[in-house]
Amino acid sequence: MPLVTSTEMFKKAYEGGYAIGAFNVNNMEIVQGITEACKEEKAPVILQVSKGARAYANHTYLVKLVEAAVIECPEIPIVLHLDHGPDFETCKSCIDGGFTSVMIDASSKPFAENIEITKKVVEYAHDHGVVVEAELGTLAGVEDDVKVSAADSSYTRPEEVEEFVSKTGCDSLAIAIGTSHGAYKFTPDQCTRNEKGILVPPPLRFDVLEEVSKRLPGFPIVLHGSSSVPQEYVKMVNEHGGKMPDAVGIPEEQLRKAATLSVCKINIDSDLRLTMTGTIRQFFDEHPDKFDPREYLKPARANIKETVRHKLVDVLGCAGKA
Ligand code: G3H
Ligand code: 13P
Ligand code: ZN
């Protein structure tokens, strides 16, 4: 089937109590690792491209890689989505250039300005058969070149969501309930330590999610910053020359719970980066004489596939839903 929008996917996910995985893609091996897992697990998927990914790999290369995945995986629905579109022009360029979904992220702007920019993108997108994700509330962490400190982040205010959605006409809404971007989501002093000395982060604000859902019945909610930062890969990085002290993510049980509620899209990027980097570091440590990129990208791609498979089956609940 050709690229699809997320409309049908989200409807089924909402009703079925699961979430669609939205994985960031930057090169061929990442596209292949993700889509091979989705094909084998019969899972619908959102492949998303950031401004940074477009700058790195070039819009056309990324679109063509995703189109190749569509040809290779005809049995699963695939959405091509712009992640964190910073302005109308970037969204327009992706809408005109083959994407089926865009995010306009004006969450750092004042409420009225966020509405105004989002509405403009929605009007253009809907005229072209493309759906729009918007954001209310501010996540901590780094997206492209924008760095938001924990002190400047803020939870979504549930009392704003109805006005925002009705005035903008957006198709899904990303909210801030305590997730954040990157591999260092919490400082050690924000966490407690369990009996094994492992950092346990503070729980997500399910009260905010529930209040938002009550005000927007049936409306798909999106969680950004939802990598779990698997400790096996943090260990692999650290044992093979890397230095990632105290990297910590969102516990998978909490994401599973969010997926059974109104959260229909869960964004995962850092876990794939960590998988790829850990695998390549280990490879070089064990094979210092090797220099053929195919030899180290092959295990990296295979491990990305397994990381994604685990998310589909054990966290998102979307395996078998294609
Ligand atoms: O939210 C940000 C995503 O992880 C994309 O990261 O902007 O470095 O491509 P990037
Ligand atoms: P992570 O950094 O937690 O993987 O979040 C990715 C994301 O939200 C992409 O938009
Ligand atoms: Zn994000």
Image: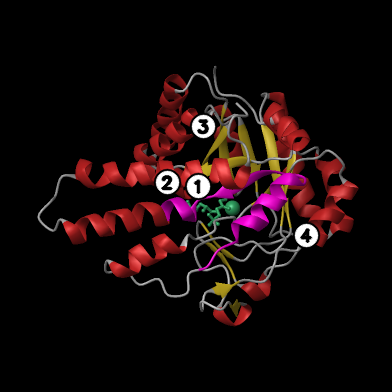
- Mark 4 lies on residue: 206
Label 1 CB less than 8 angstroms from ligand 1: yes
Q: Disc 4 vs disc 1: Cβ atoms closer than 8 Å?
A: no
Residue range corresponding to the magenta coloring:
248-273
Question: Marks 2 and 4, Cα distance to the nearest angstrom?
Answer: 35 Å
Q: Which label's residue is closer to the chain start, 3 or 4?
A: 3
The disc, 1 or 3, on the residue closer to the chain's N-terminal end is 3
Look at the numbered disc 2 and say if its residue's Cβ is closer than 8 Å to ligand 1.
Answer: no
Q: Secondary structure at mark 2?
A: helix
The reply to whether discs 2 and 1 touch (Cβ–Cβ < 8 Å) is: yes
Q: Nearer the viewer, residue 158 or 39?
A: 39
**Coordinates of residue 194 in the picture (x, y in percent):** 58, 77
Which one is nearer the viewer's eye here, 129 or 314? 314
**Image coordinates for residue 255, horizontal then vertical, percent:** 65, 53
User: Quadrant where the N terminus lies?
Assistant: top right
Amino acid type at mark 2 = Ala
- Categorize mark 1 by other alpha carbons within 10 Å: few (<14), some (14-19), many (20+): some
Chain-order first, disc 2 or disc 3: 3
Q: Marks 3 and 4: which is nearer the front? A: 3
Query: Which residue is at 34% across, 42% downward?
Result: 301
The mark found on residue 51 in the picture is 1
Q: Reading the chain from its start, which is encountered first: label 4 or label 1?
A: 1
Relative vertical location of residue 72 with respect to residue 171 in this rendering, above or below: above
